[in-house]
Image: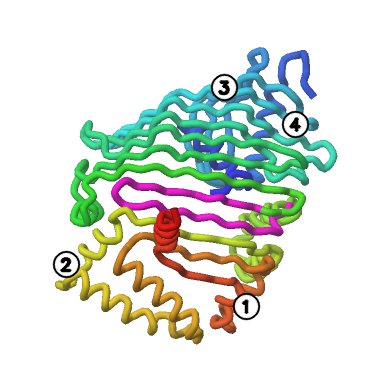
Amino acid sequence: MLHNTPRWAVATLAFTLLGSSSAFAVDAGAFGERLKSVLSAQGLSLTYASADEAGSDVVLRAMKVGAPGEAGTDIGDVTFAGVTGSTEEGWKIASIPIKDIEKTEGATKVSVTNIAVEEIEIVGTAGDAASKAASEIFFKHAAVGNVTVTEDGKPGLTVDGSEVTNTVGENGAISSEFNLGDFNADFSVGKPNETQAVMREIGYEKLSGSASGMAAWDPTSGELKLEPFTIAAEDAGELNFSYSITGYTPSFIQSLKQLQQQMTANPQNSQASGMAVMGLISQLYLKSAELSFADDSLTGKLLDYYAKKNGQSREQLTQNLTAMLPAVLGYLQNPEFQKEVTDAVTAYLADPQSLTISIAPQNPVPAAQLIGAAMGAPQTLPAVLSLSVTSNDAEADEDDGGDAN
Protein backbone atom coordinates (compact mmCIF):
# COMPACT_ATOMS: atom_id res chain seq x y z
CA MET A 1 0.00 0.00 0.00
CA LEU A 2 1.80 3.09 -0.89
CA HIS A 3 0.91 6.20 1.12
CA ASN A 4 2.16 8.91 -1.20
CA THR A 5 0.90 7.61 -4.52
CA PRO A 6 -2.23 9.23 -5.86
CA ARG A 7 -4.30 6.06 -5.55
CA TRP A 8 -3.06 5.27 -2.06
CA ALA A 9 -3.88 8.75 -0.67
CA VAL A 10 -7.22 8.95 -2.42
CA ALA A 11 -8.24 5.39 -1.50
CA THR A 12 -7.49 6.07 2.19
CA LEU A 13 -9.51 9.31 2.11
CA ALA A 14 -12.39 7.59 0.28
CA PHE A 15 -12.39 4.76 2.86
CA THR A 16 -12.57 7.16 5.79
CA LEU A 17 -15.29 9.20 4.06
CA LEU A 18 -17.30 6.00 3.77
CA GLY A 19 -17.75 4.96 6.92
CA SER A 20 -4.83 31.98 -0.37
CA SER A 21 -6.96 32.02 2.74
CA SER A 22 -9.93 34.31 2.68
CA ALA A 23 -11.47 36.27 5.51
CA PHE A 24 -14.87 35.81 3.89
CA ALA A 25 -17.11 32.75 3.64
CA VAL A 26 -15.65 29.91 1.64
CA ASP A 27 -16.85 29.34 -1.94
CA ALA A 28 -18.58 26.00 -1.40
CA GLY A 29 -19.38 25.48 -5.07
CA ALA A 30 -15.79 26.01 -6.19
CA PHE A 31 -14.50 23.72 -3.45
CA GLY A 32 -16.92 20.93 -4.42
CA GLU A 33 -16.04 21.14 -8.10
CA ARG A 34 -12.29 21.10 -7.38
CA LEU A 35 -12.68 18.03 -5.15
CA LYS A 36 -14.75 16.35 -7.87
CA SER A 37 -12.07 17.13 -10.47
CA VAL A 38 -9.21 15.84 -8.32
CA LEU A 39 -10.98 12.59 -7.50
CA SER A 40 -11.90 12.11 -11.15
CA ALA A 41 -8.23 12.35 -12.11
CA GLN A 42 -7.54 9.53 -9.64
CA GLY A 43 -10.23 7.26 -11.09
CA LEU A 44 -13.03 8.03 -8.62
CA SER A 45 -16.41 9.56 -9.35
CA LEU A 46 -17.88 12.12 -6.92
CA THR A 47 -21.42 13.45 -7.12
CA TYR A 48 -23.50 15.54 -4.73
CA ALA A 49 -26.88 17.28 -4.73
CA SER A 50 -25.61 20.65 -3.52
CA ALA A 51 -22.61 22.39 -1.96
CA ASP A 52 -23.51 24.63 0.97
CA GLU A 53 -21.31 26.89 3.07
CA ALA A 54 -21.69 27.41 6.79
CA GLY A 55 -19.05 29.93 7.80
CA SER A 56 -15.73 28.21 7.17
CA ASP A 57 -17.37 24.80 6.72
CA VAL A 58 -18.57 23.22 3.48
CA VAL A 59 -21.36 20.64 3.38
CA LEU A 60 -21.69 18.43 0.31
CA ARG A 61 -25.23 17.03 0.48
CA ALA A 62 -26.30 13.60 -0.76
CA MET A 63 -22.69 12.79 -1.59
CA LYS A 64 -21.79 9.63 -3.52
CA VAL A 65 -18.34 8.19 -4.28
CA GLY A 66 -17.61 5.31 -6.64
CA ALA A 67 -15.96 4.15 -9.83
CA PRO A 68 -16.53 6.15 -13.04
CA GLY A 69 -19.80 5.27 -14.73
CA GLU A 70 -21.24 3.68 -11.58
CA ALA A 71 -23.89 5.02 -9.24
CA GLY A 72 -21.43 5.14 -6.37
CA THR A 73 -21.88 4.54 -2.65
CA ASP A 74 -24.36 6.83 -0.95
CA ILE A 75 -22.49 8.58 1.86
CA GLY A 76 -25.09 11.20 2.69
CA ASP A 77 -24.25 14.74 3.82
CA VAL A 78 -20.53 15.23 4.48
CA THR A 79 -19.15 18.23 6.35
CA PHE A 80 -15.66 19.55 5.59
CA ALA A 81 -14.70 21.64 8.62
CA GLY A 82 -12.39 24.64 8.51
CA VAL A 83 -12.07 25.02 4.73
CA THR A 84 -9.78 27.79 3.47
CA GLY A 85 -8.18 28.73 0.17
CA SER A 86 -9.18 28.71 -3.47
CA THR A 87 -9.03 26.45 -6.50
CA GLU A 88 -6.07 28.38 -7.89
CA GLU A 89 -4.00 28.54 -4.69
CA GLY A 90 -5.17 25.25 -3.21
CA TRP A 91 -7.64 24.21 -0.53
CA LYS A 92 -7.02 23.22 3.07
CA ILE A 93 -9.49 21.32 5.26
CA ALA A 94 -8.94 21.18 9.01
CA SER A 95 -10.92 17.97 9.48
CA ILE A 96 -13.78 15.85 8.22
CA PRO A 97 -16.08 14.93 11.12
CA ILE A 98 -17.32 11.45 10.24
CA LYS A 99 -20.14 9.66 12.00
CA ASP A 100 -19.78 6.08 13.13
CA ILE A 101 -20.78 3.58 10.46
CA GLU A 102 -23.06 0.63 11.13
CA LYS A 103 -24.36 -1.73 8.47
CA THR A 104 -26.29 -4.97 8.81
CA GLU A 105 -26.82 -7.61 6.16
CA GLY A 106 -28.57 -10.73 7.35
CA ALA A 107 -26.77 -12.09 10.40
CA THR A 108 -23.67 -10.02 9.65
CA LYS A 109 -23.19 -6.62 11.25
CA VAL A 110 -20.26 -4.28 10.54
CA SER A 111 -19.53 -1.28 12.73
CA VAL A 112 -16.77 1.32 12.31
CA THR A 113 -16.23 3.85 15.10
CA ASN A 114 -14.04 6.83 16.00
CA ILE A 115 -13.16 7.78 12.42
CA ALA A 116 -10.94 10.82 11.96
CA VAL A 117 -9.39 12.57 8.97
CA GLU A 118 -7.39 15.71 9.68
CA GLU A 119 -5.35 18.35 7.85
CA ILE A 120 -6.30 17.56 4.27
CA GLU A 121 -4.79 19.55 1.41
CA ILE A 122 -5.87 19.83 -2.23
CA VAL A 123 -3.18 21.19 -4.56
CA GLY A 124 -4.03 24.39 -6.40
CA THR A 125 -4.15 24.79 -10.17
CA ALA A 126 -1.99 27.93 -10.31
CA GLY A 127 1.41 27.55 -12.02
CA ASP A 128 2.79 24.04 -12.12
CA ALA A 129 2.16 23.16 -8.46
CA ALA A 130 -0.23 20.35 -9.35
CA SER A 131 2.20 18.84 -11.87
CA LYS A 132 4.96 18.64 -9.24
CA ALA A 133 2.88 17.03 -6.51
CA ALA A 134 2.87 13.30 -5.88
CA SER A 135 -0.84 13.60 -5.36
CA GLU A 136 -3.26 16.45 -5.82
CA ILE A 137 -4.92 15.45 -2.56
CA PHE A 138 -3.08 14.76 0.68
CA PHE A 139 -3.90 14.21 4.36
CA LYS A 140 -1.65 14.41 7.40
CA HIS A 141 -3.57 12.12 9.72
CA ALA A 142 -6.30 9.52 9.47
CA ALA A 143 -7.51 7.02 12.04
CA VAL A 144 -10.20 4.45 12.69
CA GLY A 145 -10.68 3.52 16.32
CA ASN A 146 -12.43 0.20 15.87
CA VAL A 147 -13.85 -2.09 13.21
CA THR A 148 -16.00 -4.98 14.40
CA VAL A 149 -17.68 -7.67 12.34
CA THR A 150 -20.21 -9.79 14.20
CA GLU A 151 -22.18 -12.86 13.17
CA ASP A 152 -25.40 -13.47 15.12
CA GLY A 153 -24.15 -11.02 17.73
CA LYS A 154 -20.77 -12.72 18.21
CA PRO A 155 -17.56 -10.86 17.19
CA GLY A 156 -15.78 -12.75 14.41
CA LEU A 157 -13.26 -10.02 13.64
CA THR A 158 -12.13 -6.88 15.44
CA VAL A 159 -9.46 -4.38 14.41
CA ASP A 160 -8.42 -1.67 16.87
CA GLY A 161 -6.25 1.41 16.49
CA SER A 162 -5.74 1.83 12.74
CA GLU A 163 -3.80 5.01 12.05
CA VAL A 164 -1.83 6.73 9.28
CA THR A 165 0.38 9.79 9.76
CA ASN A 166 2.00 11.56 6.80
CA THR A 167 4.76 14.17 7.16
CA VAL A 168 6.07 16.50 4.46
CA GLY A 169 9.75 17.38 4.70
CA GLU A 170 12.20 19.38 2.64
CA ASN A 171 11.77 19.45 -1.14
CA GLY A 172 8.37 17.85 -0.80
CA ALA A 173 9.70 14.56 0.61
CA ILE A 174 6.96 12.52 2.27
CA SER A 175 7.30 10.01 5.08
CA SER A 176 4.51 7.90 6.48
CA GLU A 177 3.91 5.77 9.50
CA PHE A 178 0.97 3.43 9.27
CA ASN A 179 -0.42 1.13 11.90
CA LEU A 180 -3.16 -1.04 10.47
CA GLY A 181 -4.14 -1.97 14.01
CA ASP A 182 -4.39 -4.94 16.32
CA PHE A 183 -6.63 -7.66 14.93
CA ASN A 184 -8.46 -10.55 16.54
CA ALA A 185 -10.18 -13.22 14.44
CA ASP A 186 -12.39 -15.98 15.84
CA PHE A 187 -12.83 -18.79 13.31
CA SER A 188 -15.51 -20.47 15.40
CA VAL A 189 -17.96 -17.63 14.77
CA GLY A 190 -20.42 -17.62 11.91
CA LYS A 191 -21.68 -20.16 9.46
CA PRO A 192 -19.13 -22.99 9.07
CA ASN A 193 -17.06 -22.79 5.88
CA GLU A 194 -13.94 -24.36 4.40
CA THR A 195 -11.60 -21.58 5.54
CA GLN A 196 -12.77 -21.88 9.13
CA ALA A 197 -12.42 -25.65 9.05
CA VAL A 198 -8.85 -25.49 7.71
CA MET A 199 -7.74 -22.82 10.19
CA ARG A 200 -9.14 -24.76 13.11
CA GLU A 201 -7.57 -28.00 11.94
CA ILE A 202 -4.19 -26.30 11.58
CA GLY A 203 -4.56 -25.12 15.16
CA TYR A 204 -5.98 -21.61 14.95
CA GLU A 205 -9.50 -21.37 16.29
CA LYS A 206 -8.51 -17.81 17.15
CA LEU A 207 -5.76 -15.63 15.72
CA SER A 208 -4.53 -12.25 16.88
CA GLY A 209 -1.77 -9.93 15.85
CA SER A 210 -0.88 -6.58 14.33
CA ALA A 211 0.33 -4.95 11.12
CA SER A 212 2.37 -1.77 10.73
CA GLY A 213 5.05 -0.12 8.66
CA MET A 214 6.93 2.97 7.55
CA ALA A 215 7.44 4.38 4.07
CA ALA A 216 9.17 7.35 2.48
CA TRP A 217 9.30 9.09 -0.88
CA ASP A 218 11.88 11.61 -2.11
CA PRO A 219 10.66 13.50 -5.20
CA THR A 220 14.15 14.76 -6.02
CA SER A 221 15.76 11.32 -6.32
CA GLY A 222 12.55 9.45 -7.05
CA GLU A 223 13.38 6.93 -4.33
CA LEU A 224 10.43 5.11 -2.83
CA LYS A 225 11.04 3.00 0.27
CA LEU A 226 9.05 0.64 2.44
CA GLU A 227 11.01 -0.07 5.60
CA PRO A 228 9.53 -2.49 6.48
CA PHE A 229 5.92 -3.63 6.42
CA THR A 230 5.41 -6.06 9.30
CA ILE A 231 2.63 -8.54 9.99
CA ALA A 232 2.96 -10.28 13.34
CA ALA A 233 0.58 -13.00 14.48
CA GLU A 234 0.71 -14.55 17.93
CA ASP A 235 1.68 -18.22 18.02
CA ALA A 236 2.30 -18.07 14.24
CA GLY A 237 5.20 -15.82 13.24
CA GLU A 238 6.33 -12.46 11.93
CA LEU A 239 6.53 -11.53 8.25
CA ASN A 240 8.62 -8.52 7.18
CA PHE A 241 8.79 -7.01 3.72
CA SER A 242 10.90 -4.03 2.64
CA TYR A 243 12.02 -2.56 -0.66
CA SER A 244 13.62 0.47 -2.26
CA ILE A 245 13.09 1.58 -5.86
CA THR A 246 14.24 4.68 -7.73
CA GLY A 247 12.82 6.47 -10.75
CA TYR A 248 9.48 7.14 -9.06
CA THR A 249 9.68 10.84 -9.86
CA PRO A 250 6.90 13.45 -10.14
CA SER A 251 7.26 13.13 -13.93
CA PHE A 252 6.71 9.36 -13.67
CA ILE A 253 3.64 9.91 -11.50
CA GLN A 254 2.15 12.34 -13.99
CA SER A 255 2.77 9.93 -16.86
CA LEU A 256 1.11 7.19 -14.84
CA LYS A 257 -1.94 9.40 -14.23
CA GLN A 258 -2.24 10.15 -17.93
CA LEU A 259 -1.93 6.49 -18.82
CA GLN A 260 -4.63 5.55 -16.32
CA GLN A 261 -6.94 8.13 -17.83
CA GLN A 262 -6.21 6.86 -21.36
CA MET A 263 -6.85 3.25 -20.34
CA THR A 264 -10.14 4.24 -18.70
CA ALA A 265 -11.23 6.18 -21.79
CA ASN A 266 -10.16 3.47 -24.25
CA PRO A 267 -10.19 0.06 -22.49
CA GLN A 268 -10.26 -1.85 -25.80
CA ASN A 269 -6.80 -0.73 -26.89
CA SER A 270 -4.98 -3.20 -24.65
CA GLN A 271 -1.95 -3.65 -26.93
CA ALA A 272 -1.11 0.05 -26.95
CA SER A 273 -1.73 0.22 -23.19
CA GLY A 274 0.59 -2.71 -22.64
CA MET A 275 3.38 -1.02 -24.59
CA ALA A 276 2.84 2.20 -22.65
CA VAL A 277 2.99 0.34 -19.34
CA MET A 278 6.26 -1.31 -20.36
CA GLY A 279 7.63 2.10 -21.29
CA LEU A 280 6.78 3.46 -17.86
CA ILE A 281 8.17 0.45 -16.02
CA SER A 282 11.47 0.85 -17.84
CA GLN A 283 11.96 4.13 -15.94
CA LEU A 284 12.06 2.33 -12.59
CA TYR A 285 15.11 0.77 -10.91
CA LEU A 286 15.18 -1.83 -8.14
CA LYS A 287 17.62 -0.85 -5.43
CA SER A 288 16.93 -3.50 -2.79
CA ALA A 289 14.26 -5.79 -1.37
CA GLU A 290 13.92 -8.27 1.45
CA LEU A 291 11.27 -10.73 2.55
CA SER A 292 11.78 -12.53 5.83
CA PHE A 293 9.74 -14.75 8.12
CA ALA A 294 10.49 -15.51 11.75
CA ASP A 295 8.60 -18.61 12.77
CA ASP A 296 6.61 -18.96 15.96
CA SER A 297 5.08 -22.43 15.39
CA LEU A 298 3.20 -21.75 12.10
CA THR A 299 5.61 -23.81 9.98
CA GLY A 300 5.34 -26.84 12.25
CA LYS A 301 1.55 -26.60 12.30
CA LEU A 302 1.42 -26.44 8.50
CA LEU A 303 3.80 -29.38 8.11
CA ASP A 304 1.74 -31.47 10.53
CA TYR A 305 -1.50 -30.49 8.77
CA TYR A 306 -0.31 -31.45 5.27
CA ALA A 307 1.48 -34.55 6.51
CA LYS A 308 -1.75 -35.79 8.08
CA LYS A 309 -3.68 -34.89 4.94
CA ASN A 310 -1.21 -36.93 2.82
CA GLY A 311 -1.04 -39.82 5.24
CA GLN A 312 2.61 -39.17 6.06
CA SER A 313 4.77 -38.28 9.01
CA ARG A 314 6.24 -34.77 9.22
CA GLU A 315 9.69 -36.19 8.43
CA GLN A 316 8.41 -37.92 5.30
CA LEU A 317 6.70 -34.77 4.08
CA THR A 318 9.82 -32.69 4.73
CA GLN A 319 11.99 -35.16 2.81
CA ASN A 320 9.60 -35.10 -0.13
CA LEU A 321 9.54 -31.29 -0.19
CA THR A 322 13.32 -30.94 -0.15
CA ALA A 323 13.68 -33.67 -2.78
CA MET A 324 11.41 -31.67 -5.11
CA LEU A 325 13.46 -28.48 -4.88
CA PRO A 326 16.16 -29.35 -7.46
CA ALA A 327 13.50 -30.13 -10.07
CA VAL A 328 11.55 -26.95 -9.26
CA LEU A 329 14.68 -24.79 -9.48
CA GLY A 330 16.15 -26.62 -12.46
CA TYR A 331 14.70 -24.19 -14.99
CA LEU A 332 17.10 -21.52 -13.70
CA GLN A 333 20.07 -23.60 -14.91
CA ASN A 334 22.10 -22.19 -12.04
CA PRO A 335 23.50 -25.07 -9.92
CA GLU A 336 25.17 -22.77 -7.38
CA PHE A 337 21.98 -20.86 -6.59
CA GLN A 338 19.98 -24.08 -6.67
CA LYS A 339 22.23 -25.54 -3.96
CA GLU A 340 22.00 -22.35 -1.87
CA VAL A 341 18.19 -22.43 -1.89
CA THR A 342 18.01 -26.18 -1.28
CA ASP A 343 20.39 -25.98 1.68
CA ALA A 344 18.53 -23.02 3.22
CA VAL A 345 15.07 -24.54 2.85
CA THR A 346 16.23 -27.95 4.05
CA ALA A 347 17.74 -26.41 7.19
CA TYR A 348 14.62 -24.33 7.79
CA LEU A 349 12.18 -27.23 7.45
CA ALA A 350 14.31 -29.36 9.76
CA ASP A 351 14.42 -26.60 12.40
CA PRO A 352 11.99 -23.73 11.58
CA GLN A 353 13.42 -20.51 12.93
CA SER A 354 13.79 -17.90 10.18
CA LEU A 355 13.89 -17.73 6.39
CA THR A 356 15.11 -14.69 4.44
CA ILE A 357 15.10 -13.80 0.74
CA SER A 358 17.28 -10.78 0.05
CA ILE A 359 18.04 -8.68 -3.04
CA ALA A 360 21.01 -6.31 -2.69
CA PRO A 361 22.70 -5.42 -6.00
CA GLN A 362 25.72 -3.10 -5.97
CA ASN A 363 23.86 -0.65 -8.20
CA PRO A 364 20.11 -0.22 -8.82
CA VAL A 365 18.93 -2.62 -11.52
CA PRO A 366 16.70 -1.29 -14.33
CA ALA A 367 13.28 -2.90 -14.39
CA ALA A 368 13.66 -3.49 -18.13
CA GLN A 369 16.82 -5.52 -17.48
CA LEU A 370 14.98 -7.65 -14.91
CA ILE A 371 12.13 -8.35 -17.30
CA GLY A 372 14.55 -9.20 -20.08
CA ALA A 373 16.56 -11.55 -17.89
CA ALA A 374 13.45 -13.27 -16.57
CA MET A 375 12.22 -13.90 -20.11
CA GLY A 376 15.48 -14.68 -21.89
CA ALA A 377 18.11 -15.73 -19.37
CA PRO A 378 16.56 -16.64 -15.98
CA GLN A 379 19.80 -18.29 -14.87
CA THR A 380 21.39 -14.83 -14.65
CA LEU A 381 18.81 -13.39 -12.25
CA PRO A 382 20.53 -14.45 -8.99
CA ALA A 383 23.73 -12.68 -10.09
CA VAL A 384 21.95 -9.64 -11.54
CA LEU A 385 19.98 -9.14 -8.33
CA SER A 386 22.63 -10.36 -5.87
CA LEU A 387 19.84 -12.64 -4.71
CA SER A 388 20.39 -14.74 -1.60
CA VAL A 389 18.27 -17.17 0.39
CA THR A 390 19.27 -17.93 3.97
CA SER A 391 17.70 -19.60 6.97
CA ASN A 392 18.03 -19.48 10.75
CA ASP A 393 20.65 -16.70 10.52
CA ALA A 394 19.30 -14.39 13.21
CA GLU A 395 19.17 -17.13 15.81
CA ALA A 396 22.66 -18.33 14.91
CA ASP A 397 24.06 -14.81 15.28
CA GLU A 398 22.42 -14.45 18.68
CA ASP A 399 23.89 -17.76 19.80
CA ASP A 400 27.34 -16.65 18.61
CA GLY A 401 26.95 -13.39 20.48
CA GLY A 402 26.01 -15.26 23.63
CA ASP A 403 29.10 -17.50 23.36
CA ALA A 404 31.32 -14.47 22.85
CA ASN A 405 30.11 -12.98 26.08
Q: Of the residues tagged 4 and 1, which is closer to the observer?
A: 1
Q: Would residue 47 appear left or right of 257 to someone viewing this image?
A: left
Q: Of the residues tagged 2 and 1, which is closer to the observer?
A: 2
| Position of residue 306 measured from the top left corner of the image (x, y, whole percent) | 22, 67
Q: Of the residues tagged 1 and 3, which is closer to the observer?
A: 1
Q: Of the residues tagged 3 and 4, which is closer to the observer?
A: 4
Farthest residue, direction front: 405
**Residue name at image x 57 percent, y 46 percent:** 68
Amino acid bearing label 4: Gly
Q: Nearer the viewer, residue 361 or 152?
A: 361
Q: Is residue 17 shown in magenta?
A: no
| Residue at the disc numbered 1 | 372
| Position of residue 248 measured from the top left corner of the image (x, y, whole percent) | 69, 55
- Establish if 240 lies above or below 167: below
Start and end of the magenta stretch? 224-249
| Residue at the disc numbered 4 | 90
| Position of residue 400 measured from the top left corner of the image (x, y, whole percent) | 43, 60
Q: Would residue 336 appear left or right of 50 to someone viewing this image?
A: left
In terms of secondary structure, where does tag 4 sit? strand
Q: Gap between marks 4 and 1, in whole Å? A: 43 Å
| Residue at the disc numbered 3 | 79
Q: Of the residues tagged 4 and 2, which is closer to the observer?
A: 2
Amino acid bearing label 2: Lys
CB-based contact (under 8 Å), mark 2 and mark 1: no
